[in-house]
Image: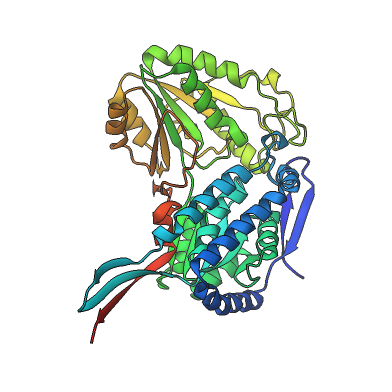
Amino acid sequence: MTNTVKCISPIDGSLYAERPVLSEAAANEAVARAKAAQVEWAARPLAERIALVQAGVAAVGEMNDEIVIELAHQMGRPVRYGGEFGGFNERASHMADIAVEALAPIIVEDSDAFIRKIKRIPHGVVLVVAPWNYPYMTAVNTVAPALIAGNAVMLKHASQTLLVGERMAAAFHSVGIPEDVFQNMFLDHGTTSALIAGNAFGFVNFTGSVGGGRAMETAAAGTFTGVGTELGGKDPGYVMEDADLDAAVDTLIDGAMFNSGQCCCGIERIYVVESLFDAFVEKAVAIVNTYKLGDPLNPETTLGPMAHVRFADEVRAQTAEAIAMGATALIDPALFPNDHDAYLMPQILVDVTHEMRVMRDESFGPVVGIMKVKDDAQAIALMNDSEFGLTASLWTRDYVRAEAIADQLETGTVFTNRCDYLDPALCWTGCKNTGRGGGLSVIGYHNLTRPKSYHIKKA
């Protein structure tokens, strides 16, 4: 019997899509084709690879009307938000724009006696294991620069969004990127691990759970394969006494609730200075009370279902545990009568402490705890009290103060007066259980290539 991967739609629990997975033998054959095709691909001029990737990105954009509907069915994002092409295009375009400079050789000496330089060499075949929450944007973070740098790419997408890889492959192939250079693959966990353990890839990029990241590193152990991971977060916001209160509330609550809270860098806990706490909470509740939870295919819906019932149930469990431990829930369930299955009402909690899982574990849903703090020292201690380290968001008009606080935070990115945004010119990275490595920016190219030194003595 053929094994398959299935996408169960969160809209109604029905089977939306199903695909057979490759056997280990077939997967190894695909890798062999990729390795053979990569040599010719890397030999093409950089300008040609850039142009083809840009054309592939544009071809994805031409599919956007269909993609928006597919995403609603696959992972529940409301159609009113129009999909991901804006960010998808922004990230790929930036990496295309900086490619020539980022991949240029470092010239140490070019004299009558010697040429000494360092080139950036593609790894060969790069495996991209992409998540479902922002399935196009997270995939293109690595797919675009990896191809531009001269690698072949094999994309394994999450089962929840299994149509995404097909869409990207069709678009990229339609503009002339060879089919063996960019392959969409349906693999089970065992075959994926076997390929990594068998040195099939020159580099592996994984975005997903901490457990998944550990599995990738375990499979790669002893192979010396590079593994880049981004494994989630528990991202804090800190509102200081001189903050623009309205902007802070609007942005942080949107950062906590957008995409039903299913954002790697979404805000999951907020610390507010005592003098602004009551006003912040009042404004936050007023915003959340306007949300409309429902069918993501309805243009009036602002909050769709979570991607899977089990994700919603985990958030329900964290919220219930917190309330049992003394937290106060401020959003009235009567406003969201259709809370059931994958459809999860938003919630704001106060009277929370770090003894509660909702303030420690990744929630990845539309719930946020808000705590009162007395000063920067307390806020810094609380923000660092986490196993994760992806982003933090600081709210103040004093940028010197913000940077001094940022220097003390254990995160990969610190925002001031904004949050929940991935700037492709900056390295996307984390620390602690968020993982290691770095995507996008010049550093993204460095991670997708290896340095090779040339020491030439002239005759």
At x 76%, y 58%, the residue is 18
- Most foreground residue, 299 or 360: 299
* Front residue (pair 109, 159): 109
Q: Nearer the viewer, residue 117 or 203?
A: 117
Q: Residue at x 71, y 47 (%)?
A: 64
Instruction: Identify the image quadrant of residue 56.
Output: bottom right
Q: Is residue 127 left or right of residue 290?
A: left
- Left or right: residue 75 versus residue 37 is right
Q: Give x and y (percent) for residue 274.
A: 37, 15
Outermost residue, bottom side:
459
Q: Give the quadrant of the C terminus.
A: bottom left
Q: Residue at x 77, y 44 (%)?
A: 13
Q: Position of residue 283 (x, y in %)?
A: 53, 15
Residue 403, picture quadrant: top left
What residue is at 54 percent from the left and 52 percent from the top? 92
In this figure, which colouring scheme has been used for the structure?
Answer: rainbow
Q: Is residue 106 left or right of residue 258?
A: left
Look at the picture and state if 371 lies above or below 32: above
- Outermost residue, front direction? 112
Question: Is 359 situated above or below 10?
Answer: above
Quadrant in which residue 101 is drawn: bottom left
Asked whether residue 327 appears in the rendered view, the answer is no
* Total numbered labels: 0
Rendered location of residue 331, percent (x, y): 60, 19
Which image quadrant: the N terminus? bottom right
Q: Residue lying furthest left in this view?
A: 113
Q: Is residue 290 above or below residue 366?
A: above
Residue 106 x/y as whole percent? 31, 65
Looking at the image, residue 296 lies above or below residue 142: above
